[in-house]
Image (spheres, rainbow, N blue to C red):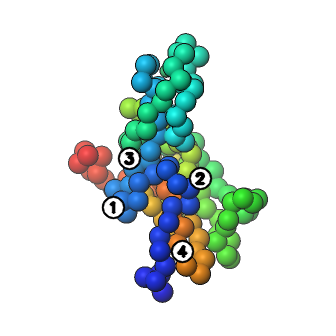
Amino acid sequence: MSETLSRVPIIDGWFTDDIDAPTLIGAKCSQCGTFVFPPRSSDCPNPNCDSITLDPTPLSRFGRIWSYTENCYAPPLPYVAAEPYEPYALAAVELAAEGLVVLGRVATGVRAVDLKVGMEMQLELDVSHRDADHEYMVYVWAPATPGSEAAQ
Ligand SMILES: [Zn+2]
């Protein structure tokens, strides 16, 4: 059934749609090198930098859990939850090279009880929800496949 649905990102411009190796798209200050996510084109967040230009840039696909929790109840609109609602974990993952912490859903089937602070995670894509014509894709954090970071 899902073969007939077209895959679309739940939010445009936040991640690439390469199902095997998706990448978050952040932005980097052209003057001081500070990274931001979600991406935006202006206003460097570094208080010591007056740059107004941020350039789109791919972010690391791997990071380590900084904190995590579990959504036991569906978030309010505009979030669209799959029906029936299934609780899912959320993780804040620190990307060492960028000095950024990126919050995201954790892959389906991985619950908070399976996570630990410091655990290595990798970016993947998952289906958030479906309608009659579309599968809405979302980026998720999944426990990293052993050795996968070394292969990057
Ligand atoms: Zn800057």
Q: Earlier in the sequence, mark 3 or mark 4?
A: 3
Element on which disc 1 rests: loop
Residue at 54 percent of width and 37 percent of height: 40
**Residue placed under numbered mark 2 in the picture:** 90
Q: Nearer the viewer, residue 1 or 6?
A: 6
> Contact (CB < 8 A) between labels 4 and 1?
no
Residue 57, horizontal then vertical, whole percent: 40, 38
Residue type, numbered disc 1: Asp
Q: Residues within 10 Å of mark 1 (few under 14, many from 20)?
A: few
Residue at 43 percent of width and 82 percent of height: 3
| Cα distance between the residues tagged 3 and 4 | 25 Å
Q: Residues within 10 Å of mark 3 (few under 14, many from 20)?
A: some
Q: Earlier in the sequence, mark 3 or mark 2?
A: 3
Element on which disc 3 rests: loop
Residue type, numbered disc 4: His
> Contact (CB < 8 A) between labels 4 and 2?
no
Residue 72, horizontal then vertical, whole percent: 70, 61
Q: Residue furthest right?
A: 76
| Cα distance between the residues tagged 3 and 1 | 11 Å
Element on which disc 4 rests: strand
Q: Nearer the viewer, residue 77 or 52?
A: 52
Asked whether the viewer can see residue 19, the reply is yes
In the picture provided, is 150 more to the left or to the right than 50?
A: left
**Residue placed under numbered mark 3 in the picture:** 61
| Cα distance between the residues tagged 4 and 2 | 24 Å
| Cα distance between the residues tagged 4 and 1 | 20 Å
Q: Earlier in the sequence, mark 1 or mark 2?
A: 1
Residue at 54 percent of width and 67 percent of height: 136
Q: Quadrant of residue 55?
A: top left
Residue type, numbered disc 2: Leu
Q: Decide if ligand 1 comes within 8 Å of the CB at mark 3.
A: no
